[in-house]
Image: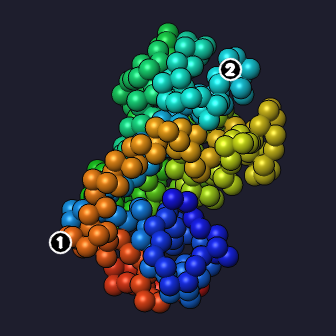
Amino acid sequence: VKEVPIEDLIPNKKYFFFSHTFKKQPYNRKLLQAIIRKNIQLIDWETITNVKGERLIAFGRFAGIVGCYNGLLGYGIKNNSYALKRAHLCEDRLEMENELANLQLPTNFKLVITGGGRVAGGAIEVLEKTNIKRVSPDEFLNGNFRYPVFTQLDVEDYFSRDDNNSFDKSAFFNNPSGHNSTFMNYAKKANLYLACHYWDNRSPLIFSREDAKNPNWKISVVADVSCDIDGPVASTIRPSTIADPLYGYDPFTEKEVDFFDQNSIGVMAVDNLPCELPKDASTEFGKMFIEHVLEPLTGNDPDDIIFRASETMNGKLTPHFEHLQDYLEGKD
């Protein structure tokens, strides 16, 4: 499922894995070059879609489930206010969710989520098991509550047009340039941020390194489930691991520091979150594979699901991914 190390790739084989290349991620250019060089057919789980372009295989829901839990766990550790059992030490999702009874959040606690897809949906499943109440973005910004609250933001809530005209979501997804982030409005109110969005690298940053220096910045822990390194969430300067999931980001030095450093923003950026609940995540993934992929893989594929998901074949990029040629050659 995860990226295969270059040295372990076997020539002339067919591979399924999350390659993290189709968004032109610089850190995996050499991986794609090796795949081409070794004449491998790469079928990326992330590009397996139906004819409408909707993904058929995804771990996003469980990434959101575990990422939300880890964010709450990290907040308790950062503030020395409660302790939760680590997710990977739980027998299953049920035991993990039972741990939520140990939450002891302040009555003025506020949590903000960016994203509207499977990942955010998984996070909200966890929040619905707690006493954290959902409010609208406007209520989040302007309301005073005597109980913990959260809000979910879609792109129109944290981006706006440079020309101040009304936000057009379809135009934004087609061309996100000409927009700017308004996330700072929420960063001044929230204690915990769950980053569950999909980010196009043409889009503005959600918050920049300069934003994090703002004296009114309030977020103490960022759980970056999306985990784009040096991307839209400035504090995510590297991925973390299941064994060591938390680190600190000093907004003034822009360097990693200890998670408990008083000047730091706590960061949770584990990039293989579903592995913390392997039994539950594997069962769901297997069901999706059997339902959507197994038959096309054996040859009955009238919608060309496998071909459309293949980034490489016969030692070159396939027609659906020719736009990666400059990236492959190091020109982009």
Q: Judge left or right: residue 4 versus residue 129.
A: right
Q: Judge left or right: residue 174 versus residue 274.
A: left
Work out which residue is located at the far top of the displayed protein and give it.
146
- In the picture of the structure, the residue carrying the numbered disc 1 is 302
- Category of crowding for the residue at label 2, using alpha-carbon neighbours closer than 10 angstroms: few (below 14), some (14–19), many (at least 20): some
Q: Residue at x 62, y 58 (%)?
A: 229
Q: Judge left or right: residue 280 versus residue 37.
A: left
Seen in the picture, residue 5 relative to 141 is either above or below; the reply is below
Residue 61, given in percent of the width and then of the height, sits at 42, 42
Front residue of 180/43: it is 43
- In the picture of the structure, the residue carrying the numbered disc 2 is 83
> Looking at the rendering, which quadrant does residue 231 occupy?
bottom right
Residue 46, given in percent of the width and then of the height, sits at 41, 61
Q: Earlier in the sequence, mark 2 or mark 1?
A: 2
Can residue 273 be spotted in the picture?
no
SS label for mark 2: loop
In which quadrant of the rendered image does the C terminus lie?
bottom right
Can residue 5 be spotted in the picture?
yes
> Looking at the rendering, which quadrant does residue 263 occupy?
top right
